[in-house]
Image (tube, helix red, strand yellow):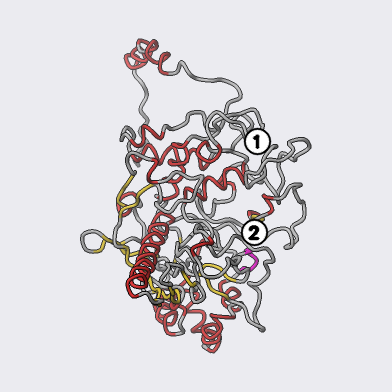
Amino acid sequence: MKKLSVLIPSAFALTGLALSGQASAKFFEDTVIGERPAVEKHMSQEDIEAGNLHLKKIIKHGKVVFDARFNELDGRGRPATTGGGAPRDPHGQPEFLRTSGPDANACAGCHNQPSSGGAGDFVANVFVLAQTLDPVTESISPEFSNERNTLGMFGAGPIEMLAREMTEELITIREDAKMEAAYSNMSVTKPLEAKGVSFGSITVTPEGKVDPTNIEGVDWDLIIKPFHQKGAVVSLRQFTNNAMNHHHGIQTTERFGENTDPDQDGVENELSVGDVTAATVYQATLPAPKQKLSLNPIRRKAAREGEQLFSEVGCNSCHVPEMKLASREFSEPNPYNPNGNLKVEEVSELLTWDMTRFNEGNSLLKRHRQGAIIKAFTDLKRHNLCDDDYNHFCNEQLTQGSLIGFASADDFTVPGEPRPTEVFLTRKLWDVADSDPYGHRGDLTTITEAVYQHGGEARDVRDEFFDLQQEDRDKIVEFLKTLGVF
């Protein structure tokens, strides 16, 4: 039997350590003992743009920020601001509150299934829009907030890039229609399609205004917003800036300004621009989920047959198995970022990397010279899954933002409308084996339950599924259980 070998420092080595004590002391001269912030060192955006930091170092720091359990020395808490950033009376505000926030110590406190960056249990549900209330609310009633389950961030980088490419395709269609309408002095209507997904059609007047009447499943600005279940957040960076203030009471300098203390907690510059870049990069480089077939031959065979049945009943019409990316390169920041988030014109150099290299072991497959294939099982489009018989997914009462998106109301022929409460982005299924519970509220415990509640636009497919024999339904479920964060 072999013995485990353990290296023991020699006397010479220990002497060497002692001899280097002066240099070591200088290296650690900034060390703080006792109480200290969870994020002790901040990252410089200037160093990132200058190329002074290797991507792996940026990712490592991003994980520190994502996993950090913030404390009062970090600036945890926001007594003088709401979760939306609006000022309020700081006196008597709760330090933690599950509904209105701050409601978490760390990003990984909710995003942890099966590991840091993943989905969350029902206990990790968030109460969207309650964070903006002043005074805060302790009620979880749907009249005050939209309760939603925490989604996983694995594969978020490819998802953001897919949304960007789809956005570019849709905006190109709009701009072509504007040119044709101006040239012909007549209104022009064009179908809206990106990556094979139809978003209805668009009509542009000779004056350049958009008639959004027939736009489907996306905001009228045609920017695909792949984050939040309502499709309300355009980038991981925006998601991070929002969440830091909302959930932790941590104000980022790019959102709230340098050397300011808007929440009056006594701490300035709580997270730097570079810190947010690092946290964004960490999430963007989390490996994409992939398929892993069971070693059990019965389950393996069932999953292969279930994949075929998945398409035959029509599940793939919205849960599109794969889409092609024209580029496998991620770039930060996002060109469609709204105000309050770092923009392309504000950086000297974009931070870029090949997603097929730094998302090792994921489901991205190289395609040709430049592109990649993303197997996320989504169309990144909003759908209404409710009808008179099945309306489980129509429980929300509060609208989240406007269909105008980031555009101006003057760009359209009709007044802006709120995003409908009954529509949600098609859920990505590539992590379905590790993202239970299901449904936007996380109140469905099995895949079959979630399928059962599909009404509205998915009613015909739902009925096709339940018209199958039980064995065939089980095969589809078995196939879906092969998709996860392995």
Residue 269 % position (x, y):
54, 31
How would you rate the neighbour count of disc 1 (Cα within 10 Å): few for under 14, some for 14-19, many for 20 or more? Answer: many
Three-letter residue code for mark 1:
Asp
Which sits in the foreground, 26 or 456? 456
Query: Which residue appears at 32% of the width and 37% of the height?
Result: 54
Residue located beneath label 2 in the image = 122
Q: Pick whichever, 352 or 60, lies toward us.
A: 352
Residue 366: say if magenta: no
Residue occupying the far front of the picture: 185
Query: x and y percent of residue 484 in the render?
Result: 46, 62
Q: Is residue 195 left or right of 471 when viewed as pictured?
A: left
Tell me if residue 161 comes above or below residue 206 in the rendering.
above
Q: Distance between the residues labelled 1 and 2?
A: 30 Å
Say whether disc 1 or disc 2 marks the residue closer to the N-terminus.
2
* Position of residue 84 measured from the top left corner of the image (x, y, whole percent): 63, 47
| The label number, if any, that marks residue 263 in the structure image | 1
Tell me the magenta residue range: 441-445
At numbered mark 2, what does the secondary structure look like: helix, strand or loop? helix
Q: Quadrant of residue 6?
A: top left
> In the figure, is residue 32 to the left or right of 332?
right
How many numbered circles does the render carry?
2
Residue at image position (56%, 68%) is 424
